[in-house]
Image: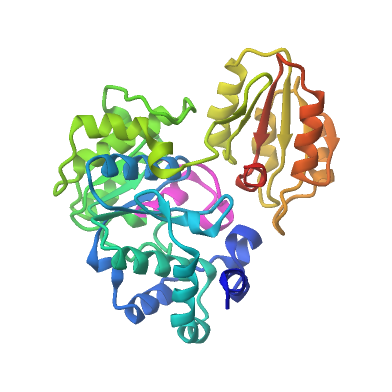
Amino acid sequence: MNYQETLNWMFAQLPMYQKEGKTAFKKDLTNIKAFSNHLNYPYKKFKTIHVGGTNGKGSTSHMLASILQEAGYKVGLYTSPHLKNFTERIRVNGEEISKDSVVRFISENKTFLEEQKLSFFEMTVGLAFDIFKKEKVDIAVIEVGLGGRLDSTNVITPEVSVITNIGLDHTQFLGETMSEIAFEKAGIIKNEVPVVIGERQKETSAIFVAKAKECSSEIVFASDVKGEYRTDLLGEYQLKNTKTAVEVIKQLKSFSVSEENIINGLLSVVKNTNLKGRWQVLQEFPKIICDTAHNREGLFYVLNQLKKEKFEKIHIVLGVVSDKNLEEILPMFPQDAVYYFCKPNIPRGLSEIELQKKSKGFNLNGEAFLSVKEAVNEMELRMGKTDIGYIGGSTFVVAEIL
């Protein structure tokens, strides 16, 4: 199989959460444990940092990788989902893995993958671990896919566990309340491994403290620590993530990282790791911004920042996935904006007509478009020089315009 055929095969094996939703979610670590055994436990050959949480885990992971690269280490970075190319999920010192390495890995392990019926996510985690072993990375930053306790990445014993924050997202898998979700996320806390919690939240702090105590793990809440660091990532919400990243670095006992490495790493995240889609300014005059925020907590910060911009009128291209709780997020959007409703091009995408209808109930008015591209083109035509444009609502909407 060539690269495209290999990817098609991977996507087709079992439903992929990114595209299909709930049917792809497995509440079980049996497969990844069997695969790890088959691959001879590659993750035991390098050190790791495990990053979970509802919002900010991707940005925090990239910040950590950037800082460690500045300190001269060879750093693996595993994140999900990808925006444009599958290979974005696995990087070494900021470079995406080669397409050939994906083809080779699947070809070598295809019989096992078919017999064991591994999911798309499970085989991707195995691929990441295998690449990092072969590349002899000093450390790998591993982002949790979904939840924590039963996530495929949760076979590692990291140097530090990280939970950025808790919000009501993916409730159909993780629980309906903040405390239920916190319980799932706390599953990445390991015995005698320090844990950094990004934000102290009254509904969840006690759960993390109790789990840390049970595991004899030191626990730090980054939001309690005074001081601020600047970063090249532009969203105001990134200040919380910088604090978390810095506290994680301070907990890394066997690595030598200077204050200068921290400062330079945080100011060079895009250059060092090629992160996209976080308050990314696509153009000026008129200014158009895109952001992958897609749940209540993430959108709260992004929409607040949008309102602080100087503009005559706001234009918003909005698309969401079908399992999104619209009653929770739509009231947050400005009623005086012009909306361009669209459907992200994945099976989970919510129809633009349905989104338009639901939005009308919250006084958000605009036209519906058959594709993200059509919506963006129309917005660009209608915008005045002093207007501002925002593209978002889903990672998959942003992916289509980058």
Residue 199 seen in the current view: no
The residue closer to the viewer here, 275 or 202, is 275
Q: Is residue 3 above or below residue 236?
A: below
Residue 398 image point, x, y percent:
63, 42
- Horizontal side of residue 362 vs 197, given as left or right: right
Q: Residue at position x 71%, y 51% from top?
A: 322
- Horizontal side of residue 343 vs 179, given as left or right: right
Residue 310 location, quadrant: top right
Q: Residue at position x 39%, y 62% from top?
A: 153
Residue 257 image point, x, y percent:
19, 39
Residue 242 image point, x, y percent:
35, 32
Q: Quadrant of the C terminus?
A: top right
Residue 157 location, quadrant: bottom left
The residue closer to the viewer here, 293 or 5, is 5
Q: Residue at position x 80%, y 45% from top?
A: 352
Q: Quadrant of the N terminus?
A: bottom right
Segment tinted magenta in the rendering: 165-186
- Horizontal side of residue 203 vs 331, given as left or right: left
For the rendered model, the colour scheme is rainbow
Q: Is residue 402 magenta?
A: no
Residue 335 location, quadrant: top right
